[in-house]
Image: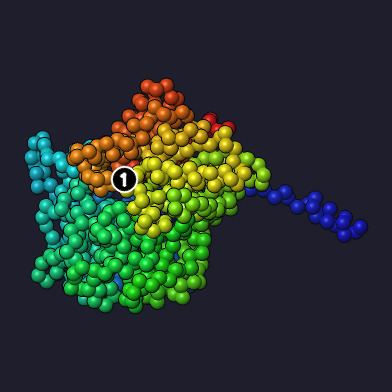
Amino acid sequence: MKRFAILIAVAVILPAAAAVRTIQPDDQFKLVSVSDVAFSPDGTKVVSVRRHVNLAKDRRDATIVLTDVASGTERALTVDRAGLASPQFAPGGGVIAFIASDANKHGQVFVMPLDGGDAKAITATAEGVQQYAWRPDGGAIAYVTQDDDPNKKAIEAHHDAFDLANDDYLTTAYTPASHLWLVGADGEHPHRLTSGRWSLATAYPPSPPASPLSWSPDGKSILFTRVPNTRDGDAYLSQIERYDVASGKISPLTGNDRFEGYATYSPDGSKIAYLYSYRGDPNNLNDVFITTAAGGPGIDVSRKLDRAIYRAQWYPDGKSLLVGAHDGTRTALYRLALDGSVEPLGTGDANPSWQFWIDAAIAPNGAVVFPGSQADRPTELWYIAADGTTRRRLSDLNGAVASLQLAKTETITWTNDGFDEDGVLTYPTGYTPGKRYPLVLVVHGGPQAASVTSFNLLDQLLAAHGYLVFEPNYRGSDNFGNAYERAIYMDAGAGPGRDVMAGVAKVESLGIVDTSRIAVSGWSYGGYMTSWLMTHYHVWKTAISGAAVNNWVDMYNLGDGNYQIGFEFKGSPYVGNNLRDYIAQSPITYAAQTRCPVLIISDTGDVRVPIAQSYEMYHALQDNHIPVRFVGIPVSGHNPSDPIRSSDVNRLWLRWIDDHLK
């Protein structure tokens, strides 16, 4: 009795525990991202770029952070510099280089000593540096920048007509070629290495390099990827070339004239790894090939793995490579030996960050560091010891969001048309077993991509509103091997549609779905699948079609991929009977069959999937008396990238679903 009284007294004086709340749209502004990881030459430290939201200026500010691997202690090296990207240690280790904006908002290469001192710009390019690489002796840096327009004076006088070819529909001027330059580490003696109407493959930070430069270990040559011009529609004509520093001679490496890139020298310089579409077919996976330093056709070493590779890095021993790929509902890292044998790395439930690129680095002892997220924790910095199994988290950047009441996520599997298939199912926050819930499909884009069990903000927001959220993978996804990825060829919608519906049936078989309240949604190719599904199946209470491919002919004529769309069919829509295939696989053909209210969203300046297709779907639905709302986001690009507009899209998504499923 005395003990009971004491316990009561304690209960009375203790403060009540604060209730754990669910995630809200504004929590997006608290998320911190990690990217651009690199090891110091001795493997004891890691640099990375951290980006956090500056809501007042509607941007993400960046900082370079130095992390001690043993202790996890961190030190900011730069704070909120505009355009910050790509930190790299000098080969000697006492200096880092990075890209940041100058006063004219052009990215330049800066160098900074680690023991104190100001950063110094060592380039002064007119159009900005796209990527760079230290020479192995640390005495110089190779970099890529765009040429000045040779017709600049004529253009200033309004003599600015120019030839159009395989360009997107918003092109207003020809983009000059980008070429290779060299500058001393002290900023002295910058000079051009390559020139011509042809160009190096281009991409601007903070995007990953279109194909990184690679120095030979002796500093005598540089590997790069060449394209015939800067037109996106011609970018498939990519080939690896080698620049000889002493002679200035440029020579092709393999004899391929398309679909290759990402070449890297082995640590001893005797071999070169590169990526190439299996059998030279872009409908197939990217495989890893190995050739000798002398060049020539390579040997495919990743066929046994049978997964889509987007980056390959040499281990220090030169006998194996670090590769990353989707595998089921995971993003996995592997150690790929030159004989094709594969050893998975122990990433646990952490999924390395993936954006058609694996952001990871290897230490001299074989340890690996990468940014990655878990289903219930946003991106952090992760470390895998050299034994390949010991894993630990080095950062705690997003602990505040991870501590919220988040929804449970699991993998769902099924079979259809002879394929093993899977998807990610997120349960409503506070899920009650035995209760039936409305279901929202969020279909991934790509289509050569996959939904995995990483942290997904939109899924968590929907789950917090009481919805089951299902992300189905479908044929064309890159998570089940070459046969599965290329099965989408000449079958853009019908086969994938059956896959998605088989996945929906699997979720319904769990007995937890209110089948009278199901929505389908997606962005990009996920928008295409939404448009296809809403016009071919009538189980939906509503649909959200974001940046959707609705008309393949428009994609061929207007998008940045233009000519390359022909590889997904039997060629141009204007040759033979090909046009009927484009029409048959375009959702706009079937728009009048839609039976549910539809929200259409698109960026007004999107060249990946031009907004013209959204206008077409809007008018087709409106003219057939189908409830429809069309929202334009007044920005360029395929997705709104700034914090406020991206948050607005999530809020719009939630509001539409609530209005139609609640």
**Helix, strand or loop for disc 1:** loop
Colour basis: rainbow
Classify 295 as above or below 420.
Answer: below
Total labels drawn: 1
Residue 606: percent from left, percent from top? 31, 39
Quarter location, residue 633: top left
- Within 10 Å of disc 1 (Cα), the crowding (few <14, some 14-19, many 20+) is some
Residue at the far right in the pictured view:
1
Residue at position x 37%, y 31% in the image = 590
Amino acid at dot 1: Met
Residue at the far front in the pictured view:
418
Residue 272: percent from left, percent from top? 25, 70
Residue 56: percent from left, percent from top? 43, 41
Instruction: Please tell me which residue lies in front, 119 or 39.
Output: 39
- Residue located beneath label 1 in the image: 490
Residue at position x 44%, y 75% in the image = 386
Instruction: Please tell me which residue lies in front, 430 or 33.
Output: 430
> In the shown orientation, is residue 189 left or right of residue 79?
left
Question: Quick check: can you spot residue 203?
Answer: yes
Classify 485 as above or below 495.
Answer: below
Residue at position x 11%, y 52% in the image = 197
Instruction: Please tell me which residue lies in front, 279 or 294.
Output: 279
Instruction: Please tell me which residue lies in front, 482 or 231.
Output: 482
Residue at position x 36%, y 26% in the image = 620
> In the shown orientation, is residue 614 left or right of residue 183?
right
> In the shown orientation, is residue 5 left or right of residue 493?
right
Question: Quick check: can you spot residue 473?
Answer: no
Quarter location, residue 274: bottom left
Residue 497: percent from left, percent from top? 42, 42
Q: Quadrant of the C terminus?
A: top right
Q: Quadrant of the N terminus?
A: bottom right
